[in-house]
Image: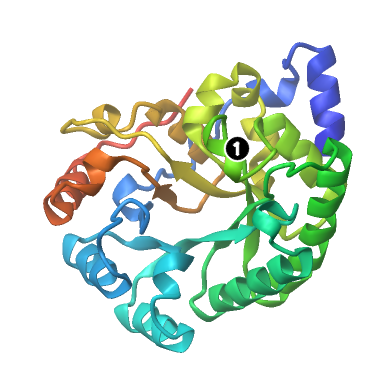
Amino acid sequence: MTKELLSQRKVNSFSTSSSTSKPDHANPVLSLIDRISINQITTYHWSLEESLRGLVACGIPAVGLWNRKILDLETAQSAELVIDSGIKVSTISLAGGFTGSNEYPFEEAITDAIQLIEFGGQVNAAAVQIASGPRAGHTLNHARELTVDALKRLGDVAASNGTRLALKTMKNPLARNWTFLNSIESTLELIDTCQHPAVGIAIDPAHICLENSAKNLIADIISLIAAVQISEIEPGESVQELFPDFDVMEAINDAGYQGYYDLEVWCEQFWQSDYSETLTNLRLACQSETPSQFS
């Protein structure tokens, strides 16, 4: 289905009727305060327990867990901390590396991913983020075959644990050590080849802005969007000022996405900030927003 949509849109200059359909204004729009999640990568220097306590204290409803923080403790202890905190889990990062980068065996990558997915089931995570791994000397077709094989196997595990897989797209040069999937279209084509209902995509609004054709795809791929990762944030007192791509976030919401918007910021300046103050200001800005429909 996705591949057919992509092929058709290339022929039709990305202008099918479904991409221009008007939103249903009868459906109420939730305030972003109910939909914001903070990834533990964003609060880099907080431990797992500190981040859970900090987000709850700041009134943030959800967290994006990072396996590096989870594995600082016994997994059973990490799961207990998350469950006892009462906070929702938007995503867990990061499984993958199926192409054998850094001499990481394929079956070992599968085993590690299964453990993370099962942890996701324990804490009721909406999605587990997946990075394929770079080409690592493989042909592109072989890298794709390895990733599709892995996703089919892990998709079954995700489904049995009540969660989804969110396949990441990354732009170069950041992608060099993480994935060979550098565009939203290439990621969607691989998901289409996989044909597994538990396998979806992690969307970054900043990437959509860079790929004009992708913005027109939002309505058509909404059922595939398993996670929305916000990588860019600016100083400001309103949500429109805080999030440079707020119009894309609205478009994703308007198309029917009901999950969290997970703030995953890789920024030294942010990492050195006062997390409690920053998150309190973020909550206040989201709380005071007047939701608007994207049209």
- For image coordinates 60% across by 37% down, the residue present is 176
Q: Is residue 145 above or below residue 80?
A: above
**Front-most of 256 and 44?**
44
Which image quarter: residue 74? bottom left
Q: Position of residue 123 (x, y in %)?
A: 48, 77
Farthest residue, direction front: 103
Residue type, numbered disc 1: Arg
Q: Position of residue 272 (x, y in %)?
A: 19, 47
Q: Is residue 231 left or right of residue 278?
A: right
- Scheme by which the image is coloured: rainbow
Q: Residues within 10 Å of mark 1 (few under 14, many from 20)?
A: some
Which image quarter: residue 150? bottom right
- For image coordinates 58% across by 37% down, the residue present is 175
Q: Does residue 31 appear in the picture of this structure? A: no
Q: Is residue 155 above or below residue 189?
A: below
Provide the residue designation for mark 1: 176
**Front-most of 56 and 154?**
154
Q: Position of residue 237 (x, y in %)?
A: 15, 33
